[in-house]
Amino acid sequence: MKKSRSSEKSPDVVLIGAGIMSATLGVLLKELQPNLTIEIFERLDVAAAESSDAWNNAGTGHSAFCELNYTPELPDGSVEIIKAIKIAESFEVSKQFWAYLVEKNFLRSAPEFIRTIPHMSFVWGQDNVNYLKKRYDALQTNHLFKGMEYTEDPQLIEEWIPLAMEGRDRSQKVAATRMEIGTDVNFGALTRCMFEQLQKMDGVNMHFNHDVKDLDRDSDGSWKVKVKDLGTGQKRTLKTKFVFIGAGGGTLHLLEKSDIPEGKGFGGFPVSGQWLKCTNPEIIKKHHAKVYGKAAVGSPPMSVPHLDTRMIDGKQALLFGPYAGFSTKFLKNGSYFDLPRSIRINNIRPMLAAGIHNIPLTKYLIDQVRQSPEDRLEALKEYFPEAKMEDWELEIAGQRVQVIKKDEKKGGVLEFGTEMVSAADGSLAALLGASPGASTTVSIMLTMLQRCFKQQIMSEEWQTKLKQMIPSYGLSLAKDEELAESIRAQTSEVLDLNNPETVIS
C-alpha cells in the first residue's frame, strides 16, 4: 500500500466505508478535481463486503421495470408511477457514468459487472392481474418504459419463464410484463474495480481493517477523524475539510457521533435477509430473467420476492428470496448491540412512534423468523411450482437498516428508501437507508455534491466535466424522449449490452 504522509495528516476528503457509494464519490471527486487528497477507511479486509456484495443485495439494475413496490396502487384504484420514473431515470444516469469510465479505460470490460437480462413482473389471481394491467398502462405514458410487453397468455409466459409455468394450474389467472433491456449488475465487482483504480491515483490512500471510532468538529469548522488500526491496535487522528459516511448500516452510529443538528432524530430499524440458492445446473440453465412479484403486506422493499438470474464470479446463478428476518445487528459483520447503542434521547420518540405505526411489519418479520425450510420451499413454489428441496440451499444475505425519522404529525415514520443527511455548511454528509440504493448511486452522489460542494459545482470547470461524464447532466431524460433514446443507445453500445454474447442465456 502506497503512503502519502502529507495527505494522511490532513487530507481534503475522508471517505468512510468501501462500498459502491464511497467508490462512486471518490471517482467523481478525482475526476472533477484531480489534485484532491482522499483517505478511505474500511473496517473489513476487503472492499464491497457488506451491502455492495453480489450475495448481499438485490443485484438488479434497479430501473423500476419489474419492481412492483415502486408503483403502488392508490386508494382510488389508480397506479402511481412517479417513483418508478425517477428510479428509471436515475439508473440511466448511472449507466452514463459507467460508460464514461469504460471509454476512459478506468473500468475493465463492461461484461465483468453489467449484462443484459429481461426484467419481468409476474402475478397470479384476478386482483393482481388487474393491478399489473393498470401498472402497464400507466407506465406506457412515459417513454422510459417503451418496449415493455404485457400478456395474460400462459403459453407466452411459459416461453419467457418456463420454471414459473411448469406444473401450474392452467385455470389460474396469470399475467406478466417483460422488458428485454433489463440488466444484471454485480455491484461488488464494480465497486472493487473502481477502488483498484482509485488506489493508483496520486493523493489517494485506502486503509482496510481500520475502524473509524469518532468524529469531532474542530473550532475552525474542519473535522477530526479518530481511527483505529484493527490489526495493530494503533490509534490516530486525522483532520479533514470534508467527511462522507457511506458505511451502510454503520452510518447511523457515526452520524450520531458527529453530533450535527441535521442528524438529530434519526433512528434505524435493521432487517436481515436470506436467499435460497439453486444448486442444480440444469434448473439454472432453464431460467433467464429477473422475475419480481408482489410483496407481502407490511414487508420492507428489500423483501419483494424474486426468482433471479445473476452472474456472480463469472458463473450464472439462480436465487429466490429474499426471506426477511430480524437481527439487532446493523451490519452483516456487525454487533448485536448495534440497535440498542443507536438509541438516543433525540430519537426515542420517532423510533417508538414508527414501531407503533408499523405493526404489520413487525408481524411480518416475526412470521419470517419463524419460517421452517418447508415454509421457505412453499414460498418458492408460488414462483416455481415444481421446486424440490434438494435443489436449493440457504444463503445468508446482507443486513439493511431502514431509516426512521421525525415526523410532526406521527412522531416518527419508517422510510423505505435512501436518505442523505448533510451538515449545514456542507462539511459532512451521510447516507442512510437501503433500496434502491446502489443502482441510483450516481444520482445520489450528484445531489450530495450540489449540497456540499456548492461553489465548486457551479464553476465552469466542474460543469464542463460533469457534462462530459454524464451527457444528460442538467437535463431531464424523463421529459425528453429523443435525448433518452440517444443516451440509451450510446450507453448500451459502450457497455456492450447489445452484444448477444453478453446476454445472460
Image (cartoon, grey):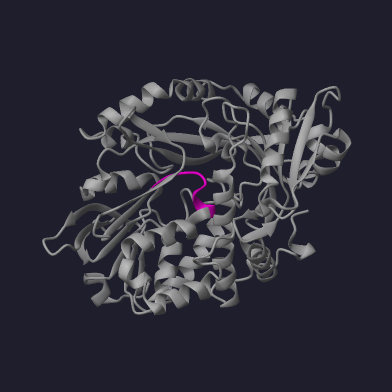
Task: Please indicate whether residue 99 sits to the left or right of residue 26 in the image.
Answer: right
Taking the spot 67% from the left edge, 68% from the top edge, the residue there is 486
Quadrant location, the N terminus: bottom left
* Residue 501 painted magenta: no
| Pick the front one: 160 or 167 | 160
Where residue 249 sits: x, y (%)? 39, 44
Q: Is residue 435 magenta?
A: yes
Side of 162 where 290 appears, left or right: left
Q: Residue 122: in sight, yes or no?
A: yes
Number of marks drawn: 0
Q: Is residue 53 left or right of residue 212?
A: right
219 and 105: which is toward the camera: 219
Q: Is residue 134 above or below residue 27?
A: above
Please provide the residue range marked out in magenta.
Answer: 432-439
> In this orientation, which residue lies closer to the viewer: 331 or 259?
259
Task: Residue 309 in the image: state x and y as whole percent.
Answer: 69, 47
* Point 55% across, 72% down: residue: 101
Examine the rendering and report whether any part of residue 311 can be seen.
no
Judged left or right of residue 253, residue 384 is right
Specify the quadrant of the image occupied by residue 384.
top right
* Residue 328 in picture, x, y percent from top left: 37, 32
Residue 66 appears in which quarter of the rendering?
Answer: top right
Up-down relation of residue 404 to residue 140 (above or below) = above
Give me the residue at 74% from left, 41% from top: 177
Residue 471, given in percent of the width and then of the height, sits at: 56, 71
Query: Outermost residue, left direction?
Result: 219
